[in-house]
Each structure stands twice: as C-alpha cells, then as structure tokens.
C-alpha cells in the first residue's frame, strides 16, 4: 500500500530537496556575479564623472544588494538541513504509540461497572447453598442458584417427565456411580465430576469416546487416570454418539448433584497445597466444593458478575465511540477502529480487575470459604488480561506510519514552499 512505502518516499523527497538546494546555490551565484558586474560599471561611471568634475546623478539608482528572498532561502537551507529533516522525521516515526487515554467519564463508567458487579457477587451470587462453614460460621446461599436448582424437578425433587424420559433413553457406558474397586474417593455423590464424560465441555470428546468404546474415563480422587470397560451400546446407537451424550448431559443438569463446571474434573490432577484447617489439597477442595453445590448451575449464577460488566462497558462504548467519517482514507478509518477496540479492551480489563478485587473482599467476608470464589469472574479477568497484554505488546508500526502521515506531508509542503 502507498502509505507504507515511506522509505522510498523519503529518498525521493531528499533528492528533490538536494535539487532545490543546488538550484538555489546556482541562482545565488548568478546574482552575486551580476552584482559584481554592476559594481564595476558603477565604479567606471563614477570615474568618468570625476574627470569632467561632476557628481554621478544615477548613483542613488544603482542597487546591487542581493535578492532578499534568495537570502532568506539560503538562511533556511543550510548544509545540515537534510540531516535535520531526516532526524526529525525518524524521531516522529519511531515515537511510541500510546494507548488511548480514558476520560474522566470513561473512568467513572469503569469504576461503576466494577462496583455494581462486586455488589452482585456479594449480595446475589453468595455461595451455592446454606452451609455451616467449619461448624462455626452459618452462611447463606444464593437465592438465584436455589431457583435454578428447582428447575426441572417437582416439589419432592423428582425429575420432570421429560427429563426422566431423556435419562432412560440416553443411557451411556460412562454413567457409573458405584465404585468398581481401584478408584480413590469415587462414589455416587461425585461420580459426575470424576468421570470426564459428564463434563459439559470436554465431555463431548471423552463422552463420545467412551460411548464408542463401551468404557468410562475417570480421574480419581488421587489424580490417577483410569479407563474402565463397562458395556457396549448397539452399533446403531453409536452412530448418534454426540446426540446421546448431549441428551444425557441435559437429563443430568437438574439432578440434585447436577453436572460439574467445565473442566472441573481435571482439578483432581492438582494434588498440591495445604489449605484450610484440614490442610486440603486443591483436588480435595474442588471435590468438596462440587459435593456442596458448586456445579454448573452455580456457575451460571456466578457468570452474572462478568456479564454485568460486559453489558455496561460495551453499551457505553457503543454510545460513546468515535464516529468514523466515511470521507477519510481507508488507512485512517482502520486506525480509528483499532484505537476504539484498544480503548474497549482497556476499559473491560480495568472493570474486571475491580470486580475480581471485590471477590477477594467477598472471600474474606465468608471467612475464606472457597465456595465464595467466583471462578467465572476470575476466568474472565484472565481472558481480558491476555487481551490487554497482547494489545500492549502489539506491533504498532502500521499505526505509527499512518499516524504521522499527515505531519510528514505538511513537513514536505513547507520545504517545497520555501
């Protein structure tokens, strides 16, 4: 593209500048020679008038001063001009592109979004259900999660006829709740977390593999992977393995234990740490959290926190975004779009940072109860943090060249108009 061919343009303009200096020097030399001839002629005329004893009446009309415009140009274009121009332009082009600054209103919106999200986390999300934490802290659970847990079941906790029919029709070989032996800390209350086919995300892979091979893939409570043969489905059913997996997941969502948060079963590989009064490892903590209601339904409740931030900040950004003039060159339009996107990334990262800090306060308020951790908010902060880092470390050569294009063009115009 033409706006990227700056090096060749700079060389062309330097050649033109050299020609201008050369022409100026030549013109200045011609004027100097002419002035010298005029002075010699004046001296001869003065000498003739002296011989006849009279004063030269044309003396006042002899003007052999140099052209003021040429003198001005000579003063402006000195021998170091090219070097100065190159230095100034190089400095301008290499100047770092700063990230868009946030206005006072931007900061106010970011802060408001973060505070509102933190308030929702503390007042609405809370923890999955009522619990007497450490047998000395009575803590209230989330009413929103409680409402979600009541969906799809009747007053006695039985599945609705529709979900019950799905459960009966979508039988899978990995739905093994009884410990066959050799599995550590595996029992009906946590079998959906430890059997990878029940994962609502990665289960599409492990669940389908298990259906096709008549097996169950497990990571037990000691972090040891197992593949255990169970039973085979009819061949015609295996053709629809992804559909069977999905139907089985839907039938399990509304059960008392529910299904785990995406990827939660892999935490059993983290056999490290000593947390709390019982010195639990990360694997033990996450298993305890799931068994006490920290499942996909509570994950949806926790997701309201980052969702509020995304809605507030993005809506404000749409309303306050710099409008792009259609008459602008394509390169300038692209730069405006890039800077608008960078500003949005910056605002989202700051707002999620505030909400995450609020979650730390919430955890302290709940006396360190790990179920007060809003994993959805922390995952979103991580995602926005990666995006923010990529923006901060981006290659900004394109932005530098387009940003300075107008200034550079004005510089050449000034030189050409001398």
Image (cartoon, rainbow, N blue to C red):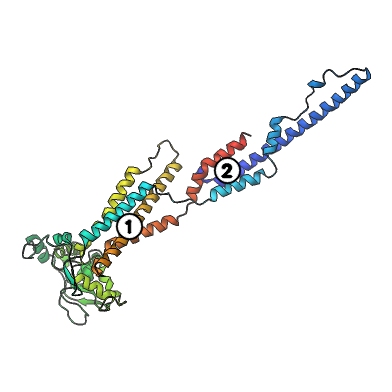
Q: Nearer the viewer, residue 232 or 67?
A: 67
Residue 292, given in percent of the width and then of the height, sits at: 18, 70
**Label 2 crowding class (10 Å Cα cut-off): few <14, some 14-19, many 20+?**
few
Hey, which quadrant is residue 236 in on the image? bottom left
Residue 407 vs 354, above or below: the answer is above
Q: Nearer the viewer, residue 2 or 236?
A: 2
Dot 1 or dot 2, earlier in sequence: 2
Question: Which residue position is annotated with label 2?
Answer: 9
Hey, which quadrant is residue 192 in on the image? bottom left
Alpha carbons under labels 1 and 2: distance apart: 45 Å
Rendered image: mark on residue 352: 1
Which residue is at 28% across, 62% downward?
Answer: 359
Residue 391, given in percent of the width and then of the height, sits at: 42, 55
Which residue is situated farthest in the right direction here? 51
SS at mark 1? helix
Residue 75, given in percent of the width and then of the height, sits at: 69, 38
- Quarter of the image that includes the C terminus: top right
SS at mark 2? helix
């Amino acid at each position: 593209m033409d706006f990227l061919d700056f090096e060749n343009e700079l060389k062309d303009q330097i050649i033109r500048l050299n020609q201008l200096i050369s022409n100026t020097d030549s013109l200045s030399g011609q004027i100097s020679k002419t002035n010298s001839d005029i002075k010699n002629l004046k001296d001869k005329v003065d000498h003739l008038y002296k011989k006849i004893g009279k004063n030269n009446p044309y003396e006042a009309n002899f003007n052999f001063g140099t052209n003021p415009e040429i003198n001005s140009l000579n003063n402006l274009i000195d021998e170091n001009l090219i070097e100065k121009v190159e230095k100034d332009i190089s400095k301008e082009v290499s100047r770092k592109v700063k990230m868009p600054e946030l206005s006072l209103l931007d900061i106010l919106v970011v802060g408001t979004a973060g505070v509102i999200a933190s308030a929702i986390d503390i007042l609405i999300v809370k923890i999955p259900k009522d619990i007497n934490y450490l047998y000395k802290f009575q803590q209230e659970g989330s009413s929103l999660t409680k409402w979600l847990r009541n969906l799809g079941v009747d007053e006695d906790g039985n599945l609705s006829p529709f979900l019950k029919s799905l459960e009966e029709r979508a039988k899978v070989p990995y739905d093994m709740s009884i410990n066959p032996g050799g599995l550590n800390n595996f029992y009906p209350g946590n079998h959906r977390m430890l059997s990878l086919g029940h994962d609502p995300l990665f289960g599409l892979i492990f669940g389908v593999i298990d259906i096709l091979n008549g097996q169950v893939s497990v990571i037990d409570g000691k972090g040891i992977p197992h593949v255990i043969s169970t039973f085979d489905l009819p061949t015609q059913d295996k053709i629809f393995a992804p559909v069977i997996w999905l139907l089985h997941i839907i039938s399990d969502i509304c059960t008392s234990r529910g299904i785990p948060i995406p990827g939660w079963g892999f935490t059993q590989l983290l056999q490290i740490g000593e947390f709390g009064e019982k010195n639990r490892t990360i694997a033990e903590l996450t298993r305890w959290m799931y068994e006490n209601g920290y499942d996909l339904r509570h994950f949806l409740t926790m997701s309201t926190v980052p969702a509020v931030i995304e809605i507030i900040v993005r809506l404000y950004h749409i309303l306050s975004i710099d409008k792009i003039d259609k008459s602008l060159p394509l390169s300038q339009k692209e730069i405006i779009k890039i800077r608008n996107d960078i500003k949005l990334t910056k605002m989202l990262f700051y707002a999620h940072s505030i909400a995450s800090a609020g979650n730390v306060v919430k955890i302290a308020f709940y006396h360190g109860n790990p179920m007060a951790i809003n994993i959805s908010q922390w995952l979103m902060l991580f995602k926005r943090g990666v995006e923010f880092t990529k923006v901060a470390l981006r290659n900004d050569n394109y932005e530098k060249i387009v940003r300075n294009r107008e200034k550079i063009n004005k510089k050449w115009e000034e030189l050409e108009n001398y």
